[in-house]
Image (tube, helix red, strand yellow):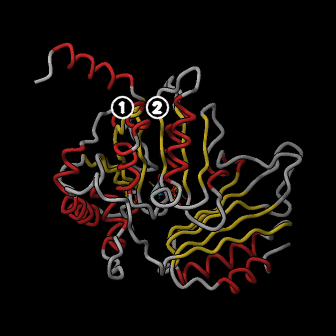
């Protein structure tokens, strides 16, 4: 039995550890929207954000808002596989910061398995000594979740959408504006079937009171060990669905908005079942004025799509010296690289 002094010492050490919130959830569910919301809020904390993005070409650096917080991009692979070492390196660097950071937010890719990410906080001595996994927040797209849960995976491949829910301490049931009450009830039933312990919070635009998700002390190693007894022993080895890939395109010059809109609308209408996610940062011809160098953002989730610009407060404007390079990324199945490249090029003004 630990003595009272030992217990007090352990509690003090735990209180000194930096809380880490892992934000996960399938492609396009609203993770970056949540991270931006946290960054915008006046919470008085020093938060470091670690971003990991899936896709040949990253665009999230243009989507995450400028803020006083420090943002680390880890785009050389998937956080749950190859870049776990990078995550640990960043954790080392951050711990030495002065003034001390108050908390860390890790946004995983939409195709990440959260298990190896969570495991990092229990298998690396340094990380364990200085950090504690506060909670895994899984953001869910109420409109598209069920189809991802039902996606048939090849033998030996985990369904990421299921894994992400199984590990959740809180589920943000986002995009409830896109579903009927009956559809929502069905989604809730499916979530509870996978994880009966996590609190479900309904949101639109990932809008949630931060005290419900940050520093909530919700991660329970005991619960995870009940579900997956070899959680701490496994070497984190897992397979991703090789049939899901990405095509990233970068293009110099300015684009014609009408052509772009016509092409993307048709593409997603025809192929939106296979193209899970598309997004881009775009330079559009004829949209600058003297005050504003508008940078456009394209967002697609299956067949739903839209454009917004830095003038609407989305993303950051072009900097005067910044080269006008548009970036577009598609993530999904059966992507035809040549077609996508040629069609994008044909949208140049
Ligand atoms: N209708 C609707 N759209 C939303 C809601 N929340 C987010 N979106 C939109 O969904 C799209 C994807 O949101 P993101 O926050 O970029 O999603 P994400 O999970 O970070 O996407 P990836 O990082 O690419 O996996 C954007 O166009 C958002 O504006 C919502 O509650 N309702």
Q: Residue 191: x and y, percent? A: 25, 60
Q: Is residue 257 left or right of residue 138?
A: right
Report if the CB atoms under discs 2 and 1 are less than 8 Å apart: yes
Residue drawn 60% across the image and 33% down it: 69
Q: Is mark 1 within 8 Å of ligand 1?
A: no
Q: Nearer the viewer, residue 183 or 79?
A: 79
On-image quarter of the N terminus: top left
**Residue drawn at 68 percent across, 67 percent down:** 328
Name the residue at the left extreme: 1
Q: Which residue is denoted by mark 2 in the rendering?
A: 103
**Residue 271, image x, y percentages:** 54, 83
Q: Secondary structure at mark 2?
A: strand
The 10 Å Cα crowd at callout 2, few under 14, some 14 to 19, many 20 or more, is many
Question: Quadrant where the C terminus lies?
Answer: bottom right
Report the residue at 17% width, 54% height from top. Answer: 196
> Is 245 above or below relative to 78?
below
In this view, 327 is above or below 100: below
Which residue is depicted at the point 34% across and 70% down? 159
- Residue 214 in the image, given as x and y percentages of width and height: 38, 34
Label 1 Cα crowd, 10 Å radius (few <14 / some 14-19 / many 20+): some
**Residue nearest the observer in this picture, 133 or 89:** 89
Q: Tell me if 139 is positioned left or right of 229 in this view.
A: right
In terms of sequence position, does the residue under pointer 2 or pointer 1 come before the other?
2
Q: Disc 1 designates what residue?
A: 215
Instruction: Report x, y in % for residue 70.
Output: 61, 35
Q: Secondary structure at mark 1?
A: loop
Q: How many marks?
A: 2
* Cα separation between marks 2 and 1: 8 Å
Q: Splitting the image into 4 quarters, where does residue 21 fall?
A: top left
Q: Quadrant of residue 337?
A: bottom right
Above or below 14: residue 330:
below
């Amino acid at each position: 039995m630990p003595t009272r002094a030992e217990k007090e010492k352990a509690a003090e050490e735990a209180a000194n550890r930096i809380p880490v919130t892992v934000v996960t959830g399938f492609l396009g569910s609203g993770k970056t929207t949540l991270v931006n919301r946290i960054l915008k809020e006046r919470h008085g904390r020093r938060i470091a954000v670690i971003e990991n993005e899936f896709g040949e070409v990253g665009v999230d650096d243009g989507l995450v808002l400028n803020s006083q917080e420090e943002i680390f991009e880890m785009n050389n692979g998937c956080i749950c596989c190859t870049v776990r070492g990078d995550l640990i390196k960043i954790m080392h660097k951050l711990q030495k910061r002065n003034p001390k950071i108050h908390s860390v937010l890790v946004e995983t890719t939409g195709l990440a398995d959260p298990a190896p990410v969570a495991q990092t906080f229990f298998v690396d001595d340094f990380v364990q000594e200085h950090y504690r996994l506060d909670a895994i927040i899984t953001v869910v797209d109420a409109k598209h979740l069920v189809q991802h849960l039902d996606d048939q995976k090849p033998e030996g491949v985990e369904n990421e959408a299921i894994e992400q829910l199984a590990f959740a301490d809180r589920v943000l049931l986002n995009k409830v504006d896109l579903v009927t009450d009956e559809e929502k009830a069905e989604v809730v039933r499916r979530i509870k079937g996978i994880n009966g312990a996590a609190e479900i919070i309904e949101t639109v635009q990932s809008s949630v009171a931060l005290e419900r998700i940050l520093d909530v002390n919700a991660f329970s190693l005991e619960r995870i060990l009940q579900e997956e007894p070899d959680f701490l022993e496994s070497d984190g080895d897992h397979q991703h669905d090789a049939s899901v890939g990405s095509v990233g395109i970068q293009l110099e010059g300015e684009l014609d908005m009408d052509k772009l809109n016509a092409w993307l609308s048709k593409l997603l209408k025809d192929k939106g079942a296979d193209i899970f996610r598309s997004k881009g940062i775009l330079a559009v011809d004829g949209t600058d004025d003297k005050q504003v160098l508008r940078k456009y953002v394209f967002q697609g989730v299956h067949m739903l799509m839209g454009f917004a610009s830095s003038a609407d407060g989305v993303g950051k404007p072009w900097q005067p010296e910044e080269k006008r390079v548009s970036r577009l990324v598609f993530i999904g199945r059966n992507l035809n690289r040549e077609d996508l490249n040629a069609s994008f090029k044909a949208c140049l003004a």
